[in-house]
Image (cartoon, coloured by chain):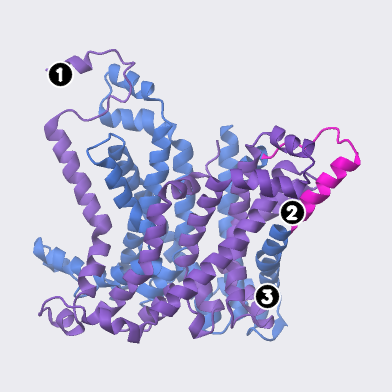
Amino acid sequence: MTQTILADLPPAPTRPRRTGHHRRRGLVGLAMSLPAFALVGVMLGWPMIQAFYYSMTSWDGITATWIGPSTYTHEFHDPAFWRVLQNNLLLLVAIPVALAIPMGIAFLLDTRVFGWRLFRSAYFLPTAISWVVIGMVSERFFAAQGQLNSLLSAIGLGFITTNFLSGERTALLAVALTFIWSMIGTNMIIFLTGMATLDPNLAEAARVDGAGGWQTFLRITVPQLKRFIQFALMMTLISAFTALFSLIFVMTSGGPGYGTTTLEFFVYQTAFEQGDFGTGAMLGVILFVIMATVGIVQVRLLRTDD
Amino acid sequence: MSAASVTELPPQVTRPRKVRRPLRGSLLFALMVAVAVVMLYPFWYMIDTSLLSETSFLNGTGGHSLASWRALGATLPWQQQLGNSTIVCLLSISIILVCSTMAGFAFAKLRYPGATIVFLAIIAALLIPVQSIVIPAYVDVANWHLLNSYTGAVLMYSAIGTPFATFLMTAYYRSLPDELLEAGVMDGLSYPAIFVRIALPMSVPALATIFVLQFIQIWDDLLIGLLFLQNVNERTITVGLGALAAGRTTNIPVLMAGSLVSALPAIVVFLVFQRFLVNGLTAGIGR
């Protein structure tokens, strides 16, 4: 991402004329960019540096005792840590679904089906709703007496009914399904925006050559949407790893056991429920390293395209 | 007949995708309706449940009533919390808009040596997950004695929203021609005056995009509010609701009424600014 942004910046003047006029312009520019820099630096940048330091201490929020990098090796021997990371990996499985469904919906809307504008707004509307509200409704939906079980019984699948939120795997499945549902709006909008940029002549040419609708979609539409798919993938991945706190907080509180505790939720639990700020800070650093790696890989992938 | 003649037209007639076969069209329409039911079901569920009393919800008997709506105030001080949400949102968004428009204008039009590094430093903060910094930030803000006022939460929201807003504004001001700036200089305007009188009025669409993105994000946030608004009387509606839900309150109809109250302002903002939200969500895609 930074790569594309860098390209957006105007080139620095090759021969800066050192007149008073230009110097004043630069000084005004410096002064105008300082508030944003100071705000981000003090509230995000500095705490990130602090997090690296505190991750190697024993810290209760008041006094910190230096331990060193061994805190990390110690954590890597904790089975709970791997259990939590496993949940993150399992959530990855939801991502292709969270892309494929909105892609299909966007494709159908793009055929300008009757009432498509209204449908688009309806599908996009849940984007305005907080995870807290979504989590509350979802908790009811997956509960023992919830609508999903009624639905399953009604269609003759009564034998699968269960309290989804009381089993570790089924609870994670419930969180994943809720996550997929709530990504539909955003991803659909991203894909619709992409489809508006498509060259209709290409699809037409494919049709003239005898390609079916499905083949046209796979061979012509999808490759042209590559940039948009990559972007949606990135946003979905970031959401899966860093935006589900409120959903998990309301729906399952991370349980049963560690059943739905993801790394981001583990950070909160460790620091603010168990009072272990040092380990919490370390888990935060690990989360940062994972997300930064994903971000850098993404930039690399985009660069090889150019 | 007409369908056959349309297909014989040369392919210059673009957008011939409108479904012409009536059966397929109806099937497609039915599918779209089914998806709409899935997407809108939670809204219906909230409305329907909030109109039941607690007993009729638990027993599945009895008709609809406003009992749960009348009981809402005793469980959730929603008037106060809606006020808190509004104050926190507007203060944070104001700070984000001031910081990001000024910085964006500077990075686009008032370049200085090192501007690129400052720009990248701000944008790099996009890579930091909130959970990675929330613990040290919480302790810092506690040490500044700001946990018992709006200030700590407002500062956090402002800082979290500023990097992306700065990116948007820089790209936006980049698209304005330099001649505008030069014309202002010719008229004897100072650079801050050019920014306020010329650039800022031209960037209203970008400001609307940042407003709606941040409004929904801050209004709907739980984590920062939960930690940084320690004074119960300053809780936002989302935090109030989250605390209730996690407290395992059994009165589901009242919770659903509260959910509707909390969701309504965000829905209104969403509907009014939908176009700008679409711009904001897709602004990060490289061109």
Q: Which residue is mark 2?
A: A32
**Which of label 1 and label 2 is nearer to you?**
2
Decide whether residue A24 is among the magenta residues.
yes
Dot 3 falls on which chain? A
- Residue at 38% x, 80% y is B246
Q: Residues within 10 Å of mark 2 (few under 14, many from 20)?
A: many
Q: Position of residue B83 (x, y in %)?
A: 46, 74
Badge 1 amino acid: Ser
Q: Which residue is mark 1?
A: B2
Earlier-in-chain disc, 3 versus 2:
2
* Distance between mark 1 and mark 2 Cα atoms: 63 Å
Front position in the image: B94 or A116: B94
Side of B23 where A298 appears, left or right: right
Pointer 3 and pointer 2 on the same chain: yes
Dot 2 falls on which chain? A
Highlighted range, magenta: A9-34
Q: Position of residue B82 (x, y in %)?
A: 43, 73
- Residue at 71% x, 72% y is A53
Decide whether residue B92 is among the magenta residues.
no
Pointer 3 and pointer 1 on the same chain: no
Q: Is residue A297 visible?
A: yes
Q: Which residue is mark 3?
A: A54
| Secondary element at tag 2 | helix
